[in-house]
């Protein structure tokens, strides 16, 4: 799923054709780097892998697991409930590894090497190298945490080979108009990196969880907080440098990219509940009851609010077709 070189080269030509407009845009966009203290702040430089420890009775905050509000898991055997949380943690950790390795690192690597078809400040390119390093470290320590949780709990992960979002992204990539193919990956990286998941924010605060889980996720949150400025600025360079036609072609895909990131991975949730010991008919009922259409839309809309604001500020919703797609997807209040 690497950015297509042809598309990147194409975009460079288009960017040059619109140099005047681009120059105006670049003059207006200011980049404030959050990486000046990277050597002293980055967790890859300063925080070794966290030992899991022996404390902690729960492996995920139950209040953040929709299924745990349902009577079937809630009234089930305590061992099943405990395992549902372990599997939810596995699902989150696997998602994180796949996101870093398959979606964020390839795109950011292209930016660092000046291959994203954008004329970015030198400081952004050098910061992109640091983000690639950070994200590779996140994938690594996330993998190590998953392995440590497995060894301590003796609960084997039950996960699909690939999370659902990678399949959704592959389909979008195929459908994406050929002249701008590659932009889908850049836009998805912007979507994912301008959101902080509630998991990153909330899990470190929950002292029912093992210290190693809390500290590892806190390390991740600390690094991720620095990326918002980078990726929101990237969007402010990117969107105005696109021609009106490119904007019109790409814009209607944005809601699907947002859903790819935020929509629950239903098959993975079901696998985790089944592996926890919940009978299959109950698993189906829980998923049907918990993930109603309205609730999913509401959750995605709430989760997408920061990204939506960045896209509005960049001018992405000025196109009718894009606005319509957002409205249809239920993402406009
Ligand atoms: Fe990360
Ligand atoms: Fe990230």
Image (tube, rainbow, N blue to C red):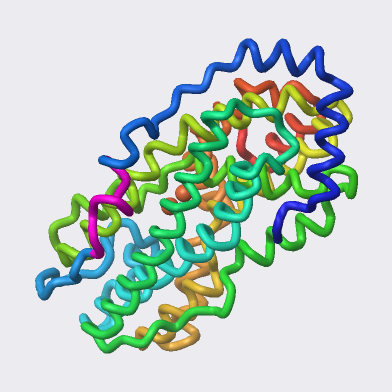
Position in image of residue 110 (x %, y %): 65, 47
Quadrant of residue 183 in the image?
top right
Residue 45 on the magenta segment = yes
Residue 333 seen by the camera: no
Choose between 122 and 184: the one closer to the eye: 122
Q: Which residues are magenta?
A: 41-49
Q: Is residue 75 above or below residue 101?
A: below
Q: Is residue 306 above or below residue 71?
A: above
Residue 259 seen by the camera: yes
Position in image of residue 260 (x %, y %): 62, 54
Asked if residue 183 lies left or right of residue 305, the reply is: right
Residue drawn 33% across the image and 79% down it: 147
Choose between 146 and 294: the one closer to the eye: 146
Asked if residue 179 lies left or right of residue 45, the reply is: right
The C terminus lies in which quarter of the figure?
Answer: top right
Position in image of residue 87 (x %, y %): 37, 75
């Amino acid at each position: 799923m690497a950015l297509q070189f042809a598309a990147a080269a194409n975009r460079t030509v288009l960017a040059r054709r619109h140099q005047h407009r681009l120059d105006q845009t670049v003059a207006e966009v200011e980049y404030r780097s959050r990486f000046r203290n990277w050597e002293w702040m980055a967790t890859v430089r300063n925080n070794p892998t966290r030992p899991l420890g022996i404390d902690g009775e729960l492996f995920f905050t139950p209040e953040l697991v929709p299924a745990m509000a349902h009577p079937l898991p809630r009234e089930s055997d305590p061992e099943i409930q405990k395992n549902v949380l372990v599997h939810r943690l596995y699902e989150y950790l696997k998602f994180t590894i796949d996101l870093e390795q398959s979606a964020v690192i390839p795109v950011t690597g292209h930016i660092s090497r000046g291959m994203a078809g954008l004329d970015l400040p030198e400081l952004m390119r050098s910061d992109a190298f640091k983000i690639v390093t950070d994200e590779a470290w996140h994938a690594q320590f996330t993998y190590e945490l998953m392995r440590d949780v497995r060894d301590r709990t003796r609960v084997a992960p039950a996960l699909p080979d690939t999370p659902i979002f990678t399949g959704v992204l592959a389909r979008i990539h195929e459908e994406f108009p050929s002249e701008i193919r590659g932009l889908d990956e850049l836009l998805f990286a912007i979507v994912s990196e301008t959101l902080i998941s509630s998991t990153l924010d909330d899990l470190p605060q929950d002292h029912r969880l093992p210290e190693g889980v809390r500290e590892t996720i806190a390390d991740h949150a600390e690094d991720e907080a620095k990326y918002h400025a980078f990726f929101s600025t990237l969007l402010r360079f990117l969107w105005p440098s696109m021609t009106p036609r490119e904007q019109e072609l790409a814009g209607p895909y944005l809601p699907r990219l947002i859903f790819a990131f935020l929509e629950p991975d239903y098959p993975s949730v079901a696998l985790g509940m089944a592996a926890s010991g919940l009978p299959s008919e109950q698993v189906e009922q829980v998923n049907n009851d918990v993930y109603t259409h309205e609730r999913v839309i509401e959750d995605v809309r709430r989760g997408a609010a920061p990204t939506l604001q960045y896209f509005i500020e960049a001018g992405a919703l000025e196109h009718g077709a894009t606005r319509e797609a957002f409205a249809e997807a239920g993402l406009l209040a």
